Image (spheres, grey):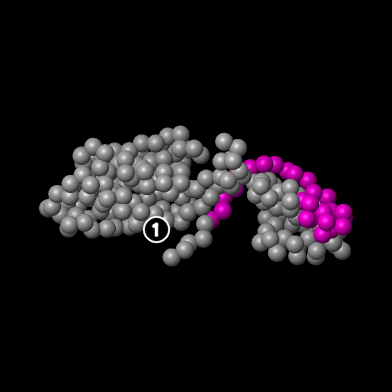
């Protein structure tokens, strides 16, 4: 549990959609970030109205840091061939607070149990490729206070580590507010103290979760 909290969990920052075709049946996956079960249900109903003329609108969603709420629906497809495989894609991808609807326009050819599972799985995977993903990371907010002679060394160290202050003030002293991963906080504080030759005061303001967007790789 402690390790999970440190590593955080994946979330969907922006939804997307993708489509595949299997034996002339169209499978359209639409994904959206959701924060509550009410939002997930409303999204599913919205997709059913949008694609009212489709044969099936199967759905799945997962909520909570550890997936405390999970639901799925086959919407008339043979049991276990649509909703559950869709949910398993979300689980396998490690994403939380997300909902997906896969709309099927029947092409006239039966796919069989295995074919349906494969098609619904691939549709969700294709939809995920067009979503913006992020990670909720356990972090620490720090306040670093130093003088004008030392600030250059501190900013140089932060730059090397790719850390940008979320706020700064230049008055009698220089104050920087930072948010850093919890796992890196202790080492960073030690390195800042060393770089500043002891001329920096570092205060822990709070512990929190923050969101970092994942890089897209094609």
At 68% across and 50% down in the image, what residue appears? Answer: 184
Task: Specify the quadrant that holds the C terminus.
Answer: bottom left
Which span is picked out in magenta? 189-213
User: Which residue corresponds to mark 1?
Assistant: 129
The percent coordinates of residue 49 (x first, y second) are 26, 46
The percent coordinates of residue 89 (x first, y second) are 37, 47
Q: Is residue 178 above or below residue 39?
A: below
In the picture as drawn, the residue positioned furthest to the front comes out as: 114
Left or right, 17 with reference to 11: left
Q: Is residue 206 magenta?
A: yes
The percent coordinates of residue 52 (x first, y second) are 22, 47
Of the pair 127 and 47, the residue shown nearer to us: 127
At 77% across and 51% down in the image, what residue appears? Answer: 189
Residue 131 figure quarter: bottom left
Residue 52 visible in this rendered orientation of the protein:
no
Left or right, 70 with reference to 25: right
**Element type at mark 1:** loop
At 20% across and 39% down in the image, what residue appears? Answer: 78
Q: Is residue 130 magenta?
A: no
Of the pair 145 and 25, the residue shown nearer to us: 25
Of the pair 49 and 192, the residue shown nearer to us: 192
**Few, some or many residues within 10 Å of mark 1 (<14, 14–19, 20+):** some
């Amino acid at each position: 549990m402690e390790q999970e909290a440190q590593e955080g969990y994946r979330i969907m920052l922006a939804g997307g959609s993708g489509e595949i075709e299997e034996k002339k049946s169209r499978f359209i996956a639409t994904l959206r970030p959701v924060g509550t079960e009410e939002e997930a249900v409303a999204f599913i109903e919205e997709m059913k109205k949008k694609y009212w003329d489709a044969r099936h609108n199967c759905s799945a969603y997962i909520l909570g840091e550890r997936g405390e709420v999970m639901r799925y629906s086959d919407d008339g497809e043979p049991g276990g061939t649509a909703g559950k495989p869709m949910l398993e894609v979300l689980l396998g991808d490690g994403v939380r607070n997300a909902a997906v609807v896969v709309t099927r326009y029947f092409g006239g050819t039966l796919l069989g149990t295995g074919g349906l599972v494969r098609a619904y799985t691939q549709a969700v995977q294709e939809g995920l490729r067009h979503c913006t993903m992020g990670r909720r990371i356990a972090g620490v907010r720090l306040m670093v206070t130093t003088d004008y002679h030392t600030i250059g060394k501190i900013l140089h160290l932060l730059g090397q580590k790719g850390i940008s202050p979320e706020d700064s003030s230049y008055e009698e002293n220089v104050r920087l507010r930072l948010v850093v991963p919890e796992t890196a906080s202790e080492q960073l504080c030690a390195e800042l103290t060393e770089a500043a030759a002891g001329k920096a005061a570092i205060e822990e303001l709070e512990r929190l979760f923050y969101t970092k967007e994942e890089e897209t790789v094609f």
